Image (cartoon, grey):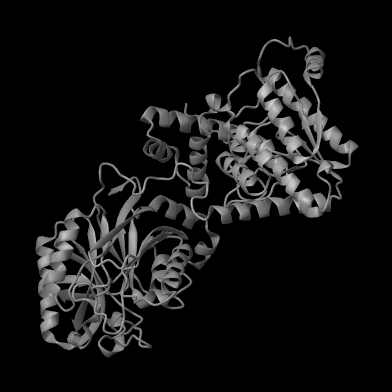
């Protein structure tokens, strides 16, 4: 599949027979008939098998390999591009090569540069490094075709898709051919490998592959030989790995005796975005003298695209190593607050406690900070301020949480103060407009700030990144604090952290109260029965949009298409979500420009001083 700048790739370890090219190619053809990808890669020397040893010297094996590749060209059922491994003889010298094939045409042949010749490997016995031959040979005649040969970057005319190839040991070099091919425009590196197994090698190999994808600001597709290779001296596992931009997408190592295919969805648009935004990558371009030749390719687009596995609906929420992720985030937030609290020589922390998610997380963090500093929990002043839209449920939750945690609890009923302010400015006190709502929010913040002055404390902000993105804050009210502890976390991650804190760091009474908070619909409670997600939509969908925009640089049309795929929404619903998100996002930048300090937690933030710089007057409305 290849659609909307996503391309599906396959890493295939076939069941093979050592020294039997005819059988091996038949198995490849069988697998290619069922492969869903647009680019498929097989292991190193997959036509002959890697472990043929001195049989590589035999003319018979090479003749059989040529015949088998000819069969593949004649019978190839695959609509995309397939990459196979086979020996190639040039002027009486053998080279370990990758053959790039589309239908009956060989698009290019890439030789191996680094040949392992230590410990269990002695590849130089049969093959020669390509470093000398590529200086004088750029085309080879093979099976009646004149084929590009050497360091090649396969590129579509519009440069939407490009890839390069390296073979096994090439990846382990200090500066690998793949690194240089990436600098010459290759977005994806395919590695045909026959990497044997021993204790702990899998972990080292995985880290190396993932790190190459990060350094290349691209994707890396690794395909290794399986257990059907000869086990006379070594064992192969079929360890296949697909990574993109430092992230492991797919991995398998089953020691399977049957053929095995894994798929990866490569986001070409994300790669292009990161290469534009990564200054280190840009600075490295054109620094190395490395001749790589472009080979034009044309890969037909498909009508649609299916993700395997489906895209994550909550990408900010950890799905693996949850305990470690929680501990890391908690350490970042807690230590950030410790530094600010001690630096300003504060005596108290003042928090507006609403009974909702964000203030609950801020209060839990503040409690842990006071414990770490050896201070009394009563040095936290929690303030609940019932207003015109406050519900009995959230008021009870706020009090229960403060009581459970042992902080100093205050209740300030702001309703009369708000009515006085309405009278002061000439508002009728009945029309439920922005002034009606925002007056309450500003009264609350003024009370907290004045209380902080009285107690030599700091007001701890509670608003999260999702609210900042959507402008779901009142300017100079909940928008403002002396330090905002939650601004680095989107709402979906706030929910995760609140649950983890309750389960892992506090006694059962706190956990019971937090469970009630987690089950309560999110609301600013500036109006009666006000439900946030009824007004701005699902936080899961909005966080997904934020993720795609800030991390991937996706445009609005692409995000709408991805929402439709990920959340099973209609095209119109998806379009409405995106339109509403960006209408809010662009119009509310002026609030973000005045955000208080806040610790960075994820790889992205909306801080105007660090990660995200945008003028307040962006106008993307269409006339």
Q: Position of residue 468 (x, y in %)?
A: 62, 37
Does 33 sit left or right of 280 as displayed?
A: left
Q: Position of residue 71 (x, y in %)?
A: 10, 67
Identify which residue, 508 or 530, lies in the foreground: 508
Residue lying at 25% horizontally and 53% vertically, measured from the top left: 299
Give above or below for 231 relative to 618.
below
Residue lying at 41% horizontally and 50% vertically, measured from the top left: 269
Q: Which residue of the protein is positioned furthest toward the bottom in this rendering? A: 125
Counting labels gives 0
Does 123 sit left or right of 584 as displayed?
A: left
Residue lying at 64% horizontally and 17% vertically, measured from the top left: 528
Does 88 sit left or right of 201 as displayed?
A: left
Does 331 sit left or right of 551 as displayed?
A: right
Q: Position of residue 564 (x, y in %)?
A: 38, 35
Q: Position of residue 609 (x, y in %)?
A: 67, 48
Residue 412 is at least partly visible in this image: yes
Q: Which residue of the protein is positioned furthest toward the front in this rendering? A: 508
Residue lying at 81% horizontally and 25% vertically, measured from the top left: 412
Give above or below for 172 relative to 267.
below
Quarter of the rendering containing residue 184: bottom left
Quarter of the rendering containing residue 427: top right
Residue 476 is at least partly visible in this image: no
Quarter of the rendering containing residue 148: bottom left
Identify which residue, 335 or 81, lies in the foreground: 335
């Amino acid at each position: 599949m290849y659609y909307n700048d996503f391309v599906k790739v396959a890493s295939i370890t076939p069941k093979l027979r050592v020294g039997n090219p005819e059988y091996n190619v038949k198995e490849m053809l069988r697998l290619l008939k069922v492969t869903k990808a647009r680019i498929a890669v097989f292991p190193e020397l997959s036509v002959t098998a890697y472990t043929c040893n001195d049989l590589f010297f035999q003319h018979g094996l090479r003749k059989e390999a040529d015949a088998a590749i000819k069969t593949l060209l004649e019978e190839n059922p695959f609509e995309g591009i397939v990459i196979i491994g086979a020996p190639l003889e040039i002027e009486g010298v053998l080279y370990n090569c990758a053959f790039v094939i589309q239908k009956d045409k060989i698009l290019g042949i890439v030789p191996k540069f680094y040949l392992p010749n230590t410990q269990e490997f002695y590849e130089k016995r049969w093959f020669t490094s390509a470093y000398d031959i590529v200086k004088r040979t750029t085309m080879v005649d093979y099976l009646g075709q004149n084929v590009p040969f050497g360091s090649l970057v396969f590129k579509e005319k519009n440069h939407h898709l490009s890839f390069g190839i390296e073979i096994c040991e090439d990846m382990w070099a200090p500066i690998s051919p793949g690194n240089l091919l990436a600098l010459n425009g290759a977005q994806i590196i395919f590695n045909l490998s026959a990497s044997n197994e021993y204790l702990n090698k899998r972990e080292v190999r995985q880290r190396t592959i993932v790190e190459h994808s990060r350094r290349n600001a691209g994707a890396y597709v690794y395909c290794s030989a399986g257990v059907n290779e000869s086990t006379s001296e070594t064992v192969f596992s079929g360890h296949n790995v697909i990574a993109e931009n430092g992230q492991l997408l797919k991995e398998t190592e089953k020691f399977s005796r049957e053929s095995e295919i894994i798929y990866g969805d490569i986001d070409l648009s994300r790669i292009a975005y990161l290469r534009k935004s990564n200054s280190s990558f840009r600075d490295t371009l054109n620094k190395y003298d490395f001749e790589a030749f472009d080979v034009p390719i044309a890969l037909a687009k498909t009508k649609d695209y299916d993700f395997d596995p489906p895209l994550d609906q909550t990408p900010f929420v950890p799905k693996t190593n949850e305990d470690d992720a929680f501990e890391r985030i908690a350490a970042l937030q807690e230590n950030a607050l410790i530094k600010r609290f001690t630096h300003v020589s504060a005596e108290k922390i003042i928090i507006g406690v609403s009974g909702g998610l964000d203030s609950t997380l801020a209060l839990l963090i503040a409690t842990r900070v006071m414990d770490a500093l050896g201070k009394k929990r009563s040095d936290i002043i929690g303030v609940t301020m019932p207003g015109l839209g406050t519900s009995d449920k959230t008021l009870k939750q706020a009090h229960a949480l403060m009581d459970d945690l042992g902080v100093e609890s205050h209740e300030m009923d702001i309703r009369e103060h708000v009515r006085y302010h309405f009278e002061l400015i000439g508002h009728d006190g009945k029309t439920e407009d922005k002034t009606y709502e925002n007056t309450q929010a500003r009264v609350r913040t003024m009370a907290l700030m004045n209380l902080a002055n009285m107690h030599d404390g700091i007001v701890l902000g509670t608003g999260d990144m999702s609210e900042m993105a959507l402008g779901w804050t009142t300017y100079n009210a909940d928008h403002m604090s002396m330090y905002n502890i939650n601004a680095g976390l989107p709402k979906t991650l706030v929910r995760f952290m609140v649950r983890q804190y309750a389960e892992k760091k506090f006694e059962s009474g706190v956990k019971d109260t937090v469970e009630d908070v987690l089950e309560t619909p999110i609301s600013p409670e500036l109006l009666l029965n006000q439900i946030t997600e009824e007004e701005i939509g699902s936080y899961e969908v909005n966080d997904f949009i934020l993720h795609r925009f800030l991390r991937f640089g996706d445009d609005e049309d692409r995000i709408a298409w991805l929402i439709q795929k990920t959340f099973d929404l209609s095209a119109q619903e998806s379009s409405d979500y995106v339109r509403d998100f960006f209408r809010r996002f662009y119009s509310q930048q002026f609030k973000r420009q005045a955000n208080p300090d806040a610790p960075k937690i994820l790889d992205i933030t909306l801080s105007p001083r660090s990660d995200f710089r945008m003028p307040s007057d962006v106008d993307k409305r269409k006339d």
